[in-house]
Image: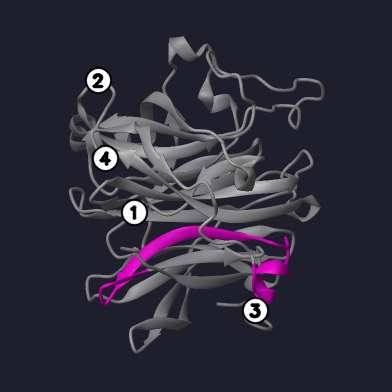
């Protein structure tokens, strides 16, 4: 998918899509559509197949826009980088997205039964955890995505779990404030965290899905292709060994602030396997990237040299990864398991 000529809602690109199936089996992209001024909306586009392979899209409009006050600032606005997980036990598609509001990027949540009508449950709230000696709600946060089924929480209680990536530098907000790390964390690079909501609480009231607790660090950068930071991509996929998490790793130079056009970086894709009985534990990870920017569309765009995986779907027995290309277009790659 590339930006449609003359479409003002896509003037600065289409990228980083979520995906989902409607009850009739149709596969859809929910792409981030970027208008002038870096104002993002979430669109809906039916995926067109040729011999079972995704080859194009048919646009069906916008399903989420920065209409709420907490999704807009005086000089910015956006609902960005949606991740959608279908959760069978809820019978709902759960969308996490980044609300680009007055205090920068903060995660939020909406739900839908059909991908077209979305009900906001509001900004995510991270319950205070004394052993961390900080309030996670103070910090910008991105790359949020729910597991598709309940998992054991740290206390053994069956819970819904969400991956996320807090960013500890508050210097963008107040000059000189700098980095505030949670207790026990010594590396200030953004890494992958997980937080939980007990199933019982969600069964009592769906709105409790935004009230996350029992926050744990899952993974930090370890290898050269992820030297600057890592972040979760698509919803975790259950495989025989555990939960497969496709993630991005970043190298290069990233100035302060949230303007992507100032970055001189390379985004590549790697993978983790998480323990199915304890999703805070990594049992395996790639030491080399699975995919790096190679094509012209991946190397040249709003931010060059970016492959940014955000969704996995199975089509006729084959898994496909949908990903952002250079913050300007959307590509698809076949994901095969080697013997």
Residue drawn at (34%, 54%), measured in percent from left and top? 85
Quick check: 147 left or right of 144? left
Q: Point out residue 99 in the picture as x, y percentages from the top left corner.
A: 56, 46
Between discs 2 and 4, the one toward the N terminus? 2
Between discs 3 and 1, the one toward the N terminus? 3
Between discs 3 and 2, the one toward the N terminus? 3
Residue drawn at (18%, 31%), measured in percent from left and top? 200
Crowdedness of circle 1 by 10 Å Cα count: few (<14), some, many (20+)?
many
Quick check: 15 left or right of 194? right
Disc 1 from disc 2: Cα separation: 24 Å
Q: Mark on residue 85? A: 1
Find numbered disc 4 in the image and state the secondary structure of the residue it sits on: helix
Comparing labels 3 and 1, the label whose residue is closer to the camera: 1
Residue bearing mark 3: 7
Is there CB contact under 8 Å for labels 4 and 1? no
Crowdedness of circle 3 by 10 Å Cα count: few (<14), some, many (20+)?
few
Quarter of the view holding residue 15:
bottom right
Disc 4 from disc 1: Cα separation: 15 Å
Residue bearing mark 2: 155
Magenta region, residue range? 294-319
Quarter of the view holding residue 11:
bottom right
Vertical relation: 123 (above or below) 265: above
Render colour scheme: one colour
Q: Quadrant of the C terminus?
A: bottom left
From this viewpoint, is residue 121 visible?
Answer: no
Is there CB contact under 8 Å for labels 3 and 2? no
Q: Mark on residue 206? A: 4
From this viewpoint, is residue 209 visible?
Answer: yes
Crowdedness of circle 2 by 10 Å Cα count: few (<14), some, many (20+)?
few
């Amino acid at each position: 998918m590339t930006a449609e000529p003359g479409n003002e809602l896509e003037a600065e690109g289409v990228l980083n899509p979520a995906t989902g199936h409607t009850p009739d089996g149709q596969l859809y992209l929910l792409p981030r559509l970027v208008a002038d001024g870096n104002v993002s909306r979430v669109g809906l586009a039916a995926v067109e197949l040729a011999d079972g392979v995704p080859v194009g899209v048919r646009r069906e409009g916008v399903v989420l826009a920065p209409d709420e006050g907490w999704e807009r600032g005086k000089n910015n606005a956006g609902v960005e980088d949606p991740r959608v997980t279908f959760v069978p036990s809820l019978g709902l598609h759960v969308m996490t997205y980044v609300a680009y509001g007055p205090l920068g990027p903060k995660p939020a949540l909406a739900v839908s039964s059909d991908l077209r009508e979305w009900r906001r449950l509001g900004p995510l709230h991270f319950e205070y955890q004394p052993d961390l000696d900080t309030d996670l709600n103070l910090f910008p946060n991105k790359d949020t995505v729910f597991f598709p089924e309940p998992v054991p929480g740290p206390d053994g209680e069956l819970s819904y779990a969400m991956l996320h990536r807090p960013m500890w530098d508050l210097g963008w907000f107040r000059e000189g404030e700098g980095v505030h790390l949670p207790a026990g964390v010594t590396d200030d690079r953004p890494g992958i965290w997980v937080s939980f909501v007990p199933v019982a609480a969600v069964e009592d009231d769906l709105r409790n899905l935004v009230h996350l607790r029992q926050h744990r660090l899952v993974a930090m950068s370890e290898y050269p292709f992820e030297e600057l930071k890592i972040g979760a991509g698509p919803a975790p996929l259950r495989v025989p060994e555990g939960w497969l998490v496709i993630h991005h790793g970043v190298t290069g130079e990233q100035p302060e602030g949230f303007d992507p056009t100032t970055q001189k970086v390379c985004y590549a894709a790697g993978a983790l396997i998480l323990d199915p009985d304890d999703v805070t534990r990594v049992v395996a990870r790639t030491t080399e990237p699975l995919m790096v920017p190679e094509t012209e569309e991946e190397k040249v765009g709003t931010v060059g040299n970016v492959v940014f995986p955000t969704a996995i779907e199975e089509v006729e027995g084959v898994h496909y990864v949908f990903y952002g290309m250079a913050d300007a277009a959307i590509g698809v790659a076949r994901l095969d398991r080697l013997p």
